[in-house]
Image (cartoon, grey):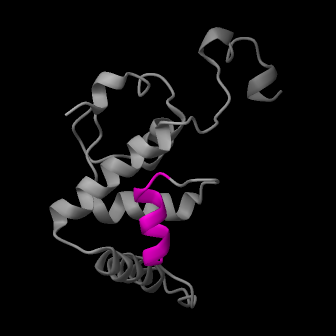
Amino acid sequence: MSGLSNKTVVDNRQELRPVRFTETGPMRLGKILKVARRETGWSVSETEFKTKGYEEALFTATNQPVPRDVGISAATVNRYERGKLDNLDWRSLSLLCFVLKPIDPITNQPLEPTNALYIACEHPPYNDAQLYEE
């Protein structure tokens, strides 16, 4: 039986919400990523270079051939930072989280990619506007 049809798994339907970007969520996530990039002292181009190096190292460490399209382009980094997420590339979001290590506004620990998605969708508990005030 799948988890969604199992009543014990889905007890409280109030907690279920479709995962969709809101108007402000991607901008909030972009701001967090931009702050993290600036704190590293990297430019957008340097961030592109760092994501390529990180992903190349992952392939090399697992003895896999390195694809030609590793890393995240500077244009994609820029789009994330401006909150221009028409669709989400999980690989890019994960790479940005692992390389930039942005801070989670709730835990004050490095932001996990799943929680970054929750910010972009303003999923509870990341829907509290006070978390993003300066």
- Tell me what residue is drawn at x 36 percent, y 24 percent: 129
Q: Is residue 134 visible?
A: yes
Residue at (69% x, 16% y) in the render: 10
Q: Which residues are magenta?
A: 72-83
Lateral position of residue 108 relative to residue 48, left or right: left
Camera-side residue: 48 or 86?
86
Residue 37, placed above or below residue 48: above
The structure residue drawn at horizontal position 20% and vertical position 62%, both measured from the top left corner, is 38
User: Between residues 5 and 38, which one lies in front from this camera angle?
Assistant: 38
Quadrant (top left, top right, bottom left, bottom right) of the C terminus = top left
Q: Tell me which residue sits at (53%, 55%) in the image.
A: 84
Closer to us: 62 or 53: 53
Instruction: Say if 43 sits above or below 5 in the image.
Output: below
Magenta highlight on residue 103: no
Magenta stretch: dominant secondary structure: helix
Residue 82 drawn at (x, y percent)? 43, 56
